Amino acid sequence: MKLRVLGCNGGIAPGHGTSAFLINDSLLIDSGTGIESLSPLEMSKVKNVLLTHSHLDHISHLPFLLNNIINSFDEPIHVYGIAPTIEALKKHIFNDIIWPNFLKLPTGERPCVVLNTVNYDDVLEINGLRVRVVPVQHSIPATGFVVSSKNTSIAFTGDCYQNDVFWLALNKLAPVDMLIVDNQYGESEKDISTLAQHYYPALLKKDLLKLNYKPPLFLTNVPPVDNHAIVYEIQNELNDWKPTILQTNDFFVLKETEEN
Ligand SMILES: [Zn+2]
Ligand SMILES: [Zn+2]
């Protein structure tokens, strides 16, 4: 399984984009500004999009992606999200006010995008990948995903705050090869962290200890600039996990063997 990090920050800056991860060239997790780094040819290869939630930094560039492919697509792009996410797209984005209703374009019979509602614990089969929909905690309804191919798997929390549900769900699955978790704030920002429902290192540590193993840990949403204090805190609090702070353009290949 291949993972390309297109965007992994909560905001934009040169060389940094918001949430977007590309798996095996055709499956996007989130469609934030990070997808700007895809060439038109690479964009045309995107067939499915998993959305963690409807916050703008996770969906902002879905409309532009559709705009780019609308004259050349063979099959519609399938978008997957929990009901509140799908409803938000219909009501607030593809409403013929903010953006045309691409659910009926270029024609109602042959639209360029299909929205699919998923539920927690669903397991989807997408292009040879297994995708499990796992609950998380955030300021609005949101979901995480565990994407597996043969014996490899990657878990994404999306935006996330202290909870039991995600960690209990993960404990029921085979150990993941990569755990990609949100850590937007430092401990001095506890109040905003609670309000916005994003982890800070000490809180994340409490939840990581709910897991019955120590997965390879990768962090998203870490501020890209002026981040010395928070990086120090991450290294200090999460030292047992030796976390990697993800960067735009990071690329990972998980080696697959036949399933056990
Ligand atoms: Zn969010
Ligand atoms: Zn976010």
Image: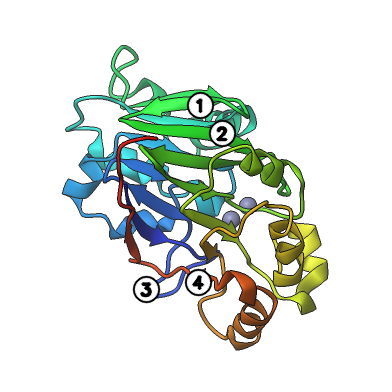
Q: Position of residue 138 (x, y in %)?
A: 71, 49
First reached walking from the N terminus: tag 3 or tag 4: 3
Q: Residues within 10 Å of mark 1 (few under 14, many from 20)?
A: some
For the point 24% across and 24% down, the residue is: 75
The extreme right residue here reads: 191
Label 4 crowd bin: few (<14), some (14–19), many (20+), radius 10 Å: some
Pointer 1 residue: 123
Badge 3 crowding class, 10 Å Cα cut-off, few under 14, some 14 to 19, many 20 or more, is few
Q: Is residue 129 visible?
A: yes
> Residue 16 in the image: x percent, y percent?
42, 70
The label number, if any, that marks residue 15 in the structure image:
3
Q: Give the residue at x 31% y 27%.
A: 112
What kind of residue is marked 1?
Val
Q: Are marks 2 and 1 in contact (CB under 8 Å)?
A: yes
Q: Residue furthest front?
A: 260
Q: Secondary structure at mark 3?
A: loop
How far apart, in angstroms, are the residues tagged by discs 3 and 1? 34 Å
* Image side of residue 71 versus residue 255, left or right: left
- Disc 1 residue: CB within 8 Å of ligand 1: no
